[in-house]
Image (tube, coloured by chain):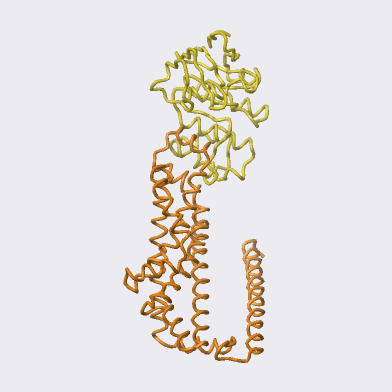
Amino acid sequence: MPRDELIRERDFALFAKKLLRRALLGAFWIGVWALIAAVVGLPKLLPGPAETARALVRLAGTGVFWQSVGMTLLRVALGYVCAVAAGALLAAGCWRFAWLDALLSPLRTVIRATPVSSFILLVWLWLKRSHVPVFISFLMVLPIIWTAAQEALSAVDGNLKEMADMYRFTVWKKLRYLYAPSVKPAFMAACMTGLGFAWKSGIAAEVIALTPDSVGKHLSDAKNYLEYPDLFAWTVTVILLSMALEAALKAVARKRREGKG
Amino acid sequence: MICLRQVSAGYPEKEVLKGLNLSLPDKGAVAVMAPSGYGKTTLLRVLAGLLPIQDGELTGLKDQKVSFLFQEDRLLPWLTAEKNVEIVSSPEKARFWLHEMEIEEMNQYPQAMSGGMQRRVALARAMAFGGDVLLLDEPFKGLDGALRARIASRIRGVFPLTVLSVHDQEEAALLGAAIIHLDQEKEERAWQR
């Protein structure tokens, strides 16, 4: 058998093993959930996996479900992308100029220390309901990216910086071949962490601000009307989407890594 | 001629060179020898313009292009051997000097190379960068005898002036370098063996 085929077969076996292990783990926890639901015996208040799955299938058959999911994704993605860009710029600015760091670092501390619910309630008064989740996602991700990127820039190897100066690297060359690769691992890790924060805080903002056409609004409605199977179904949707987004970001990062050899 | 007059230089915690007087010729090779901690590397860093002098005067290096092989290899770990050299020169020059340094696998990353290979890639980079003055800080570190001699024969005479720091006279002889014992009390002239 050719070597490539052997490698492909080995990779497939490893992948199948990993998948099976995950499926077994998932099945175990779903079993625990089913057991607790059966013991409690109140499917309207604590629906089991079967009731939740039925509710999810029913919801997924409606256009409103997909519209809400799409709009929530769009809002969170917008806040997230803006935060990544702004965080990177602020990190570079604060790393380069000490006065800017001194000026802005208290702001970063305040953003980090303030509970997300306080921000949601504050901006709810100032912004349109549909803009609140965008702003909150932005605000929660910003300090994560900013801090990680600034710390990574400060940690760039001094010997390599000196080498770049000695060999007269242009600014562009320094950015491309020294700073970007040095900062990339910490930056990507922060992006991964930030994605979870953006998603959770964005939906929390939708719940509190009752943003129209949003997953958060449906969560809130399900709670208000005591439709707990729906509440569980929307929650499962949020979890599945969060996992899918994280997997997508990891795949993009892996592809870029592989592409660069 | 490169002249250092009463040059003092060092680091905040320690002044390494104190009132050093030294003259270096415009052409040839000069090897600086001294026990560890006497300031060989500090002197090369002063000549490279990486360490400002605290006192005294340095002349003769203005408008000169200086290439420096650091004591550490300082290769960019995310670039291949070829790219590490290409980044300071042209692709043709990079390949030429890697070939001269007997690096056959140019697509290897530094972490996959032996210490000796990394040293030769760093040497190839310093050579490919070109210029008027080549500064070599322990250039043959990690290279065995036969390879050392072959590499030395290829870098000898390429730059108008080569200044190197070495631990033994044999290494200096490989490059046909005049030897300066880093004695800070009196002025040494490089061309006086």
Q: Is residue B119 above or below residue A128?
A: above
Q: Position of residue B48 (x, y in %)?
A: 48, 25
- Chain rendered yellow: B
Q: What is the x, y in percent for residue B165?
A: 58, 22
| Rendered location of residue A188, percent (x, y) | 50, 57
Identified at 46% across, 81% down, the residue is: A219
x 64%, y 23%: residue: B36
In the image, residue A194 sits, relative to residue A224, either above or below, namely: above
Q: Quadrant of the N terminus of chain B?
A: top left
| Chain letter for the part of the structure drawn in orange | A
Residue A21 or residue A201, whichever sits in front: A201
Give the quadrant of the C terminus of chain B.
top right
Q: How many marks?
A: 0
The residue located at (67%, 77%) in the rendering is A24
The answer to whether residue A28 is left or right of residue A229 is right
Closer-to-camera residue (A251/B80): A251
Between B86 and B68, the residue placed more toward the observer is: B68
Q: Is residue B127 left or right of residue A74?
A: right
Above/below status of A259 relative to A51: above
Depth order, front residue of B42/B178: B42
Q: Is residue A29 left or right of residue A84?
A: right
Q: Position of residue A85 (x, y in %)?
A: 39, 57
